[in-house]
Image: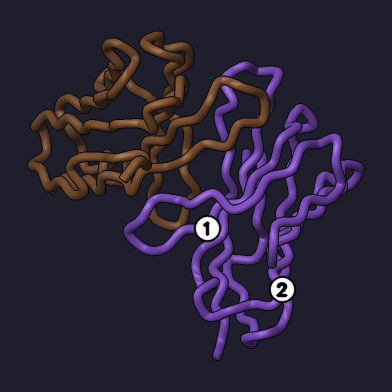
Amino acid sequence: DTGVSQDPRHKITKRGQNVTFRCDPISEHNRLYWYRQTLGQGPEFLTYFQNEAQLEKSRLLSDRFSAERPKGSFSTLEIQRTEQGDSAMYLCASSFVTGGSEAFFGQGTRLTVV
Amino acid sequence: DQQVKQNSPSLSVQEGRISILNCDYTNSMFDYFLWYKKYPAEGPTFLISISSIKDKNEDGRFTVFLNKSAKHLSLHIVPSQPGDSAVYFCAASDSGAGSYQLTFGKGTKLSVIP
């Protein structure tokens, strides 16, 4: 399977715990994005990387969120001190660095904070 | 404020007929538009896109029309098939902003009735 891969698919955690998600993009893609989707909404942009550089962060990304993409390959998204409002589907996408390039999404990680 | 709007939360169509999904946008800087299809518990799947220099793009049963003056685009599916039943998201990006982050609408749930 050469698509975008995310792990885990589901995560249930207690409020206050830290969680980390992993995304493996399509190997030839330079850009990697994180989005969050809540019920009844479309995906919302969180942050993106071009190779290993994190070039943009949404104001949705509070200080409790941190993302990395060491070596420009896979990426991790960590949420510290989780809150119930963090419950959502976290989606990773990747694309080429060219104008009008379509982003391809992974299957997402469903986070439930109890 | 929602920059991409899909005003119909749901749409039901008979198998074999045309499905028309609509999308409006407010940000005049958007110059690339995409449609994604999403099944429950999966990430969005890219369907078709259109650049602002075009007014129509066709791919098999799917055609996207863009009316820049009205800031409106639509997705036509002909003929509709039961497997097309899913949530369809309209998305837009501003290539001038550099990140190609996507701004999504809230989605339209399409049900194709056999």
**Colour representing chain B:** purple
Disc 1, SS: strand
**Quadrant in the picture for the N terminus of chain B:** top right
Q: Chain of mark 2?
A: B
Q: Earlier in the sequence, mark 2 or mark 1?
A: 1
Q: CA distance from mark 2 to mark 1?
A: 15 Å
The answer, for residue B49, to whether it is visible in the render is: yes
Chain given the colour brown: A
Out of A70 and A14, give the one closest to the viewer. Answer: A70
Counting every numbered tag in the picture gives: 2
Q: Chain of mark 1?
A: B
Q: Name which residue lies at 17% across and 25% down.
A: A80
Q: Circle 2 sits on which residue?
A: B78
Q: Quadrant of residue A25?
A: top left
Amino acid under disc 2: Val
Q: Name which residue lies at 54% across and 71% down.
A: B84
The percent position of residue A15, horizontal first and vertical second, equals 11, 38
Q: Circle 1 sits on which residue?
A: B37
The answer, for residue B106, to whether it is visible in the render is: no
Task: Evaluate if marks 2 and 1 touch, with contact meaning CB atoms under 8 Å apart.
Answer: no
Mark 2 vs mark 1, foreground winner is 2
Q: Name which residue lies at 30% across and 16% down.
A: A69
Q: Around disc 2, counting alpha carbons within 10 Å, would you say few (fewer than 14), some (14 to 19), or many (20 or more)?
A: some
